[in-house]
Amino acid sequence: MGYDKRVDGRRPDETRPIVAKAGIIKRADGSAMFRIGDTVAYAAVYGPRDLFPKFLQDPQRGILRCRYNMMPFSGAGDRVKPGGSRRSKEISMVTETALLPILNLEDFPNAVVDVFVELPQTDAGTRCAGICAAAIALADAGLSMKDLVAAVSVGKVDKMVVVDLNYAEESYENGDVADVPVAFIPRTGQLSLLQMDGLIDKESLKKALELGRQACSRIYDVQKAALKERFASAALVNGNNGAHGPVNGKGDSE
Amino acid sequence: MLVADKSIVVPGEEVAVGMDFLPTEGVYRDGEKLVASRLGLLSVDGRLVKLIPLAGKYLPKRGDVIVGKVVDVLISGWRIDINSAYTAMLSMKDATSEFIARGADLTRYFTFGDYIVTNIVNVTSQNLVDLTMKGPGLRKLSEGRVITVAPNKVPRIIGKQGSMVGMVKDATGCRITVGQNGIVWLQGEPSQEALAVAAIRKVESESHISGLTERIKAFLDDETKKLQAALNV
């Protein structure tokens, strides 16, 4: 008896239910919430802004700084110790490299864009949820970017190739488990994140990546919808006040 | 065109195909396709395709009149916070026509926390911003209050030929200066100041709904009547 039916009854290529929302943190320049099943990620973007200490500045392009953090009460088991760990540092780094290819940071030399990803509730797939949230937040901040990024974890539980593993599947004990987080740049189909944990054969990996690509394009649609919904009211354009026309007044002084 | 004019597009969305269209602000070309590079409203003008940003920080532009805050006093000038990704530089020679002796105390002219109305003279490729105080209406601000609005709403707040801000000024009797960077300075009777702030906030949040001018006019009339009634009781 192997793993032939998923614990929560999903199809192998089905993700958990996704909810995304843009612009939820008032003081941030851009923000987003991304929820996939029981994993919830919040992302806040600050900047571009001046970077100090000065030796960190790059005169050719802006810098991206990401911070990934699981809240102490977020997991199902033990309290997650607050503060950085080896794991969070690694994930912060891969989040950064997953997002960098889409950002046009050349427009902001010597500046920094800070991305904070916080997870109040986790059930596997956190780095992917974090990347999805961060991509929405960056667009919400009005930054110039080539595309969004969508991420999902794929893998193999025992003999079954699946998409979006939850914690029960990730910790399946009666067989091999492979967990492969991937991030796609949807328009070009390029990969910007590929990691692997566990054992998987070549054919299954290929199949898993293809499923991941399809899942990411569905996630991309959710991300787009979240951004459009935030500004939906702005589309009700009117002729009055020369709405969205050229700038009329030049700094009005008395 | 793949997307209708005046619709919201997100980064990475393909907006048009073919060499007949030319990408401008906020749009880039990838082979045959034109792709949006930021969140905004699509605007098509003949062959030109551009995006009107819906979010984002103020980008300094030459010639903009802005309101800034003095954050540092340097050897020969001041560093000004202009509500953008970068701070700006106001040099001594652009600050005043007075003679300033070598080693003079620059805080006599502008000191920490002062707000000034100033003009951008130059923006370099590295986004170094130079300011000047020479020009009509450029001055140090004293008294009044300062509020910050979204920089992309500034044209709505000013209105055509300053009609919107002019209306608020007339109704409240406040002096108002709207900087292109989204910093607004107002000064008047405290109750009128509060009314002017409320009106500006209303413009900011309802700028996309049609009939804005009439609504703001009605709002100002109503509130003014209420204030008067409160005074008469």
Image: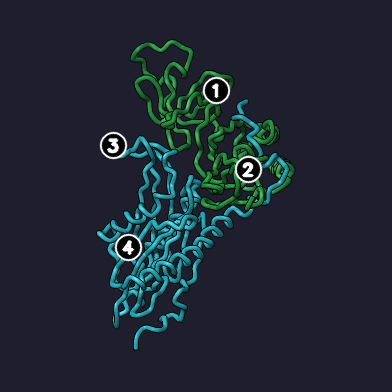
- Using the image, name the chain to which the residue with label 4 belongs: A
Colour applied to chain A: cyan
Residue where numbered disc 3 is placed: A55
Residue under numbered circle 1: B138
Q: Is residue B195 visible to the viewer in this orientation of the structure?
A: no
Which chain is depicted green? B
Q: Secondary structure at mark 1?
A: loop
Q: Which residue is mark 2?
A: B20
Closer to us: A73 or B124: B124
- Subunit under mark 2: B
Residues at marks 4 and 3 on the same chain: yes
Can marks 1 and 2 be said to lie on one chain?
A: yes
Binning the other alpha carbons within 10 Å of mark 4 as few (below 14), some (14 to 19) or many (20 upward) gives: few
Amino acid type at image mark 4: Gln
| Residue A40: x %, y % from top left | 43, 65
Q: Residue at x 60, y 43 (%)?
A: B19
Give amino acid for label 2: Asp
